[in-house]
Amino acid sequence: MTFLEQQRPTWDEYFIMIAKLAATRSTCLAFPVGAVIVKDRQVLATGYNGSPSGSAHCTAQGFCYPGLSSCDASSSLPSRAVHAEANAIAQAAKHGISTHGASIYVTLEPCISCLKLIISAGIQEVFYETGFNKGEKGLVRDAFLKDGLVNLTQIHLSSETAKRASIFLLNPTSVAREIS
């Protein structure tokens, strides 16, 4: 493998970076999350978390609910956000794209509700960056894994790949570069 080939991100790094870019569109004040659904190394749909289409964005109004700075500040009120995974699955459905046999890359491990939705959508693999489910929620997740309904893999973006990607994000990319 040549030096330039070693510079390329792995497929997992490539797709988690796309999920991280999707998270930049999040309108959630508590957890910006991004997701990308992939099949045969092709992007099928992306999603990010935020309030339902047509409703006020939490980032626009500066709060989730009146008197509440963010949804995670309450133990009783549900989040206003549609989760990134659900939005990505909804986008695929809206455009008639099958997710059967696909994988999903997410910046945050899916909650149990999203994990059930992922399984029901026929998505077989979940790659996530940051863990989320602990305690009893972890037990539910582990039961799905034990039953073979889905595979979960935590992945990390290397700092070297992130640094190379930042160069592409901060500078024009479609210019000739010198190869030494």
Image: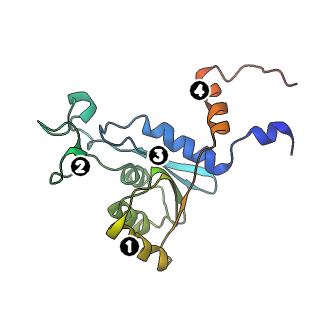
> Which amino acid, by three-letter code, is at mark 1?
Leu
> Which amino acid, by three-letter code, is at mark 3?
Thr
Circle 3 sits on which residue?
46
Say left or right for 4 vs 103: right
Tell me the CA gap for discs 4 and 2.
Answer: 32 Å
Circle 4 sits on which residue?
169
Circle 2 sits on which residue?
79
Q: Are marks 3 and 4 in contact (CB under 8 Å)?
A: no
Which of pointers 3 and 2 lies earlier in the amino acid sequence? 3
Q: Is disc 4 placed on a helix, strand or loop?
A: helix
Which of pointers 1 and 4 lies earlier in the amino acid sequence? 1
Depth check, mark 2 against mark 1: the one in front is 1
Q: Residues within 10 Å of mark 2 (few under 14, many from 20)?
A: some
Give the quarter of the figure containing the C terminus: top right
Foreground: 68 or 127?
68
Which of pointers 3 and 1 lies earlier in the amino acid sequence? 3
Circle 1 sits on which residue?
139
Which of pointers 3 and 4 lies earlier in the amino acid sequence? 3
